[in-house]
Image: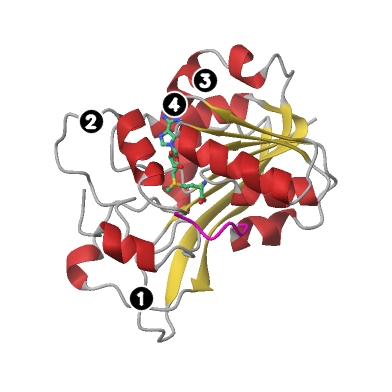
Amino acid sequence: MSGVSDAQRAQRPDRDPGQSPDRDPDLAPAEPSAQTPAEFWEERYAGTERVWSGRVNPALAAVAADWSPGRSLDLGCGEGGDALWLAEHGWTATGIDLSPSAIARASAEAERRGLSGITFVAADLVAWARDPAPIDRGAAGFDLVTASFLQSPVEFPRERVLRAAADRVVPGGRLVVLAHATAPSWADAAHAHHDFPTPEQELMALGLDPAAWRIEVAEVRERAIPAPDGTPGTIGDTVVVAERLG
Ligand SMILES: C[S@@+](CC[C@H](N)C(=O)[O-])C[C@H]1O[C@@H](n2cnc3c(N)ncnc32)[C@H](O)[C@@H]1O
């Protein structure tokens, strides 16, 4: 795992989701390890009081603000910032993550905010991609499937999971995929070279049938992200929004 000590992490419990590849291990390839992905992510969450900010990812809030709510599913939901925001905006929201600690934290936050109509499930998306029924509890599909920064430094068949995600969108529903497109502007060169997917690469990974999908957004959007010393900076998010034609 790349160079963020527990002490550094504990000093910054309010990071935005997906923030800061040069201070987080999210994107830097992990050192070869005997840990399974489940152990890696559980250790990541269990080892600190909070990893992310609890706030919605700005790109999701920007695209989804005016959509009519329905059933939503957030893949790799972490501590639930996106699913909680969706539930607060009327969606019947489900979030899935591999880490039981992340799911427990997300569920506790839903309770604290007095939200009903939200469910968090600790499960492996690799198993879900093979057979979603037991994890989706028989849902016919979702009006919105989201995957925000579903990027992992340890083994993860991302393309397979993204394609399964598309399969779970009902006609008239949408798929939203957010990913790191750049390192933060203030990241040093040693940390700036990650394999960030471009919008075109995301579309290739998704393999959506043009006859069945309309691509609404496929672009890099910049957002503000202050450096650890508080000086202003920016980071790019790859944003893909696709609508399944009815
Ligand atoms: C970079 S974090 C993003 C968290 C959240 N979506 C956000 O935007 O803050 C990636 C998340 O994917 C989850 N994850 C990784 N592999 C997974 C798997 N096989 N099944 C389910 N979740 C997984 C991790 O536990 C982690 O919470």
Q: 86 or 192: which is nearer to us?
A: 86
Q: 211 or 144: which is nearer to us?
A: 144
Q: CA distance from mark 3 to mark 1?
A: 36 Å
Q: Answer whether residue 76 is visible to the viewer in this image.
A: no
Quadrant for ligand 1 reads top left
Disc with the residue nearer the chain's start (4 vs 1):
4
Q: Is residue 125 above or below residue 238?
A: above
Q: Answer whether residue 168 is visible to the viewer in this image.
A: yes
Q: CA distance from mark 3 to mark 2?
A: 21 Å
Q: Quadrant of the C terminus?
A: top right
Mark 3 crowdedness (10 Å alpha carbons): few <14, some 14-19, many ≥20: some
Disc with the residue nearer the chain's start (2 vs 4):
2
Q: CA distance from mark 2 to mark 1?
A: 32 Å
What numbered label is drawn on residue 185? 1
User: Which residue does the image show at 28% across and 63% down from the upper left?
Assistant: 7
Disc with the residue nearer the chain's start (2 vs 1):
2
Looking at the rendered image, the disc whose residue lies closer to the viewer, 2 or 4, is 2
What numbered label is drawn on residue 35? 2
Which x, y percent locates residue 68? 85, 46
